[in-house]
Structure formats: C-alpha cells, structure tokens
Image (cartoon, helix red, strand yellow):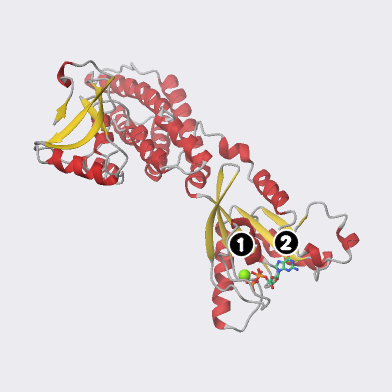
C-alpha cells in the first residue's frame, strides 16, 4: 500500500514519508514510523502510520488495511502483548489504563509512578526471597526422617516481618489511593437554607443545583467533581439537616446522614446572619460525634451586621457563597485539611481494587505462616502456607495469572492501547 522507500530495508526508529494507496486509489500522503522488535511497545515489529488529522481519512485507511487480511486489535491487546512478551509486569500494564484515564495531577502521577515500576518491584523482590525459603524448606522435607534445618527460622521470621510491614502499608494506602482515583468525598451539610446549594454552584462555577429561599429545596443528593490544586474532590450537596414531617424530605435527610458517614471531609455550612455562636456549638455536636474531619463555614457574611460577635472564632471560615466572597480562602483551607502533601506522596500508593484484594490476602497468608512458624508446626504444613502467600504475591505482579484474570484486566482498556 505504501509507495516510497522500501520500508523492509529501513532501520528501527526511523520515519518515512510516502503515499498510501488502496489499489490505484491514492488515500493520503502519510508518514510511517518503524519500530523493530524488541525495541517497541509490544516488543514485536511495529509500524505506525500517521495520516492527516481527519477521522474520515483514518477510517478509510483502516478499512483498506483490513482488506489485506489484517484484523483490528482487541481492547488492551497491545498492552496485553507487551505484558506477555515481558515488557512489564501486570501492575505496570494496569497502570497504562489508569494513565490513559487520569484526569488530575495526583491521579496522573500515581499512574505514571506505577507504570514505571512502583511498588510491584518491591513485592517481586520480597517474593523471590520467600521462594528461596520455600525451596529450602521443601529440601528439608526430602530428607524425611533426618532432622535437618536448611532454612534459618530466625531469618525467615525477619523476612516475614518485613513483607508484612510492606504489605500492611500498601493496604493502608488504598484509601488515599482510591480517593486520588475517584475523588475525595466532601459533603456540604448544614441546616436548610444555609446556602449549601449556592456554595456548590459557586465552587463548580455552574448552576448545578436549584437554589431558592424556601427551606428544604434540596431533597436528593447532588454530586459533581472538582479539581483543586491537582487533587480531585467529589463534591456532595445534601438536603438540609432538620426534623421534618415531609416524608420525601425525611428520606433526603437520612441520605445526608449516610453521606456524612462516608465523607473524608464535611463542610458544615451555617447562616452566620441568623446563627449565634452558642447555636453553632449545638449544631456542630452531631458532626463532632461522627469523628469525620470538618470545617465550619459561616455563610451569608454579606448580611451579617454584628461581625464583632464572631471575631474571636478564628477556626471558622466566613464566606458569602452568593457573592463569591472568601470562597478562594475556603478552598485553601480545604486543601490544607486533606493534607495535600499526603495525597501527593505517590511512591507507594495502591489505587487498584485487584491489588488491594491480593495485598489483603497476602497479609492474611503471611500472618498464617508466622503463626505456623511459631507453633513449631511440621515443615510440610509450613511449606503449604508459604505457597499460599507466594500465590497471592504473584497475583499482584502477574507472575501467577489465569486467562480469565488477563481477559478481565485487558478488556477494560480501550481499543488501540
Ligand atoms: N445574601 C446571601 N444570600 C445567600 C447566600 N448564599 C445563599 N443565599 C440565599 O439563601 C437561600 C438558600 O440558598 P440555598 O443554596 O438554596 O440553600 P440550601 O442550604 O441549599 O438549602 P436547602 O437545599 O433547602 O437545604 C437562597 O435564597 C440563596 O440565594 C449568601 O452568601 N448571601
Ligand atoms: Mg440546597
């Protein structure tokens, strides 16, 4: 199809201009890039055709290529081949999908870090050491009745401890990692009419929620995403907290309480023009009891006549959601609250549910090995327990896989990746 130089004679990593034909029909003038095995993404021979930026032309070219007995790649097939050819391990392959889907500074960096090796390198190294012990213990079994100990039990114990520590920290990072991927849940709560929906709209710069002077306007949960300083938040506006006889509003209030429970941060909004510091204390009781971090925000500052009454309360933030006063200051407080640095520390962060599950299973299995070790259980049982731990560790890095697992992972990719 290509008329220009003979591409078969060209070296890897070179780019060639030419014309692409379907029979005698000129399709486009193109540039072809050559990657020779093993120096390509998949480690196979690869060419890339760059045509003019029209979807129509691209489709035309693909259609005529398909006539020559080529087929389209399945979703994730390039990355799957790269994995199968040993280009990278499974967590790295999965990170490619996250990288493509990343849409905030933090999620981008977590995925990039994982693609470049991340924690799987560490897991793999520890696993290899454990394999070493497993083989020593199995060797002992070969000696049967003779009472030999090739595997130093103290060394094994130390190794198990360090594996458990690493795995424990990774499991703990999942919550933060997950928040980076899916957004940190932040609930706007408060009494009806405090201005919660107004604040949501101001933060989003969009008329997302209905605002009215009628208390009880918002009855359902309204969610949207907001990226602040590279961190993604899931912003959740809720029905105002109050006792109500309205059946539908009551459901809304119940949902508010549910949402507060899963929040990482609550913005507790109160109408500063009609609330006294004493009343606020009382209102905050419920949030305090929940133990969830919160920021108390006094709204409608534009209507407050007696500002002196609030002056000593420097833990509070005062804003006017309607007039967009001090909302930027509130944003700064929010980012401080979630310890921006903590969310940005991405070197050891687990964002993938599959890794999380395998890590938890690894943790349990290692604990089991330690129990067996200390109870002086026989070598064959110990070897069995170690195998289980190795199995779970191998599932993380992809050293142990099944076809189902691979299909499941790569089918989530988009076509052409
Ligand atoms: N003056 C002034 N009015 C505000 C401010 N913020 C909100 N309001 C008004 O307060 C009223 C209630 O605002 P909403 O945002 O609907 O309040 P809400 O907390 O969502 O109320 P519910 O959904 O009923 O719980 C509306 O009339 C807003 O225009 C503000 O900063 N200053
Ligand atoms: Mg509302």
Disc with the residue nearer the chain's start (2 vs 1): 1
Location of residue 80 in the rendering, given as x and y in whole percent from the top left corner: 25, 35
Helix, strand or loop status at disc 1: helix
- Asked if the residue at label 2 sits under 8 Å from ligand 1, the reply is yes
Q: In the picture provided, is 62 more to the left or to the right than 204?
A: left
Examine the rendered structure and indicate whether residue 210 appears above or below residue 71: below
Q: From this viewpoint, is residue 122 visible? A: yes
- Mark sitting on residue 201: 1
Location of residue 238 in the rendering, given as x and y in whole percent from the top left corner: 59, 67
Q: In the picture provided, is 207 more to the left or to the right than 129?
A: right
Q: Which residue is mark 2?
A: 323
Examine the rendered structure and indicate whether residue 217 appears above or below residue 164: below
Q: Quadrant of the C terminus?
A: top left
Residue at the outermost bottom position: 245
Q: In the picture provided, is 205 more to the left or to the right than 157?
A: right
Nearer to us in this view, 169 or 317: 317
Q: Quadrant of ligand 2?
A: bottom right
Q: Quadrant of the N terminus?
A: top left
Location of residue 326 in the rendering, given as x and y in whole percent from the top left corner: 74, 53
Location of residue 38 in the rendering, given as x and y in whole percent from the top left corner: 24, 20
| Quadrant housing residue 216 | bottom right
Q: Residue at x 89, y 65 (%)?
A: 306
């Amino acid at each position: 199809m290509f008329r220009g130089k003979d591409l078969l004679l060209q070296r890897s990593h070179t780019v060639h201009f030419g014309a692409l034909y379907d029979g005698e029909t000129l399709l486009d003038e193109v540039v072809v890039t050559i990657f020779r095995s093993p120096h390509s993404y998949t480690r196979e021979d690869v060419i890339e055709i760059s045509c003019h930026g029209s979807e129509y032309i691209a489709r035309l070219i693909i259609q005529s290529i398909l006539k020559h007995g080529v087929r389209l790649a399945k979703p994730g097939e390039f990355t799957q081949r790269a994995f199968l050819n040993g280009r990278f391990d499974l967590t790295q392959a999965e990170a490619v999908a996250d990288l493509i889907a990343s849409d905030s500074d933090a999620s981008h960096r977590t995925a990039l870090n994982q693609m470049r090796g991340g924690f799987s390198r560490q897991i793999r190294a520890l696993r290899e050491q454990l394999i070493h012990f497993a083989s020593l213990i199995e060797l002992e079994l070969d000696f049967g009745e003779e009472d030999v100990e090739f595997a130093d039990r103290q060394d094994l114990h130390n190794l198990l401890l360090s594996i458990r520590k690493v795995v424990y920290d990774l499991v703990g990072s999942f919550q933060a990692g997950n928040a980076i991927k899916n957004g940190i849940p932040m609930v706007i709560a408060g009494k009806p009419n405090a201005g919660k929906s107004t604040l949501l709209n101001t933060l989003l710069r969009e008329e997302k929620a209905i605002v009215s002077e009628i208390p009880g306007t918002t009855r359902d949960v309204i969610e949207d995403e907001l990226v602040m300083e590279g961190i993604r938040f899931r912003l959740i506006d809720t029905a105002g907290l109050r006792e109500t006889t309205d059946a539908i509003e009551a459901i809304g209030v119940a949902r508010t309480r549910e949402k507060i429970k899963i929040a990482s941060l609550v913005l507790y909004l109160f109408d500063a023009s009609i609330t006294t510091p004493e009343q606020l204390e009382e209102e905050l009781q419920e949030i305090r009891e929940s133990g969830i971090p919160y920021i108390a925000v006094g709204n409608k500052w534009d209507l407050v006549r007696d500002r002196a009454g609030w002056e000593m309360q420097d833990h509070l933030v005062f804003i006017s959601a309607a007039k967009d006063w001090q909302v930027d200051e509130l944003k700064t407080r929010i980012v401080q609250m979630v310890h921006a640095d903590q969310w940005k520390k991405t070197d050891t962060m687990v964002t993938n549910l599959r890794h999380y599950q395998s890590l938890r299973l690894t943790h349990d299995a290692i604990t089991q090995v330690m129990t067996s070790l200390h109870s002086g259980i026989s070598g064959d049982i110990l070897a069995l327990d170690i195998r289980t731990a190795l199995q779970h560790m191998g599932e993380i890095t992809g050293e142990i896989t099944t076809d189902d697992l691979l299909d499941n992972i790569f089918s989530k990719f988009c076509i052409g990746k």
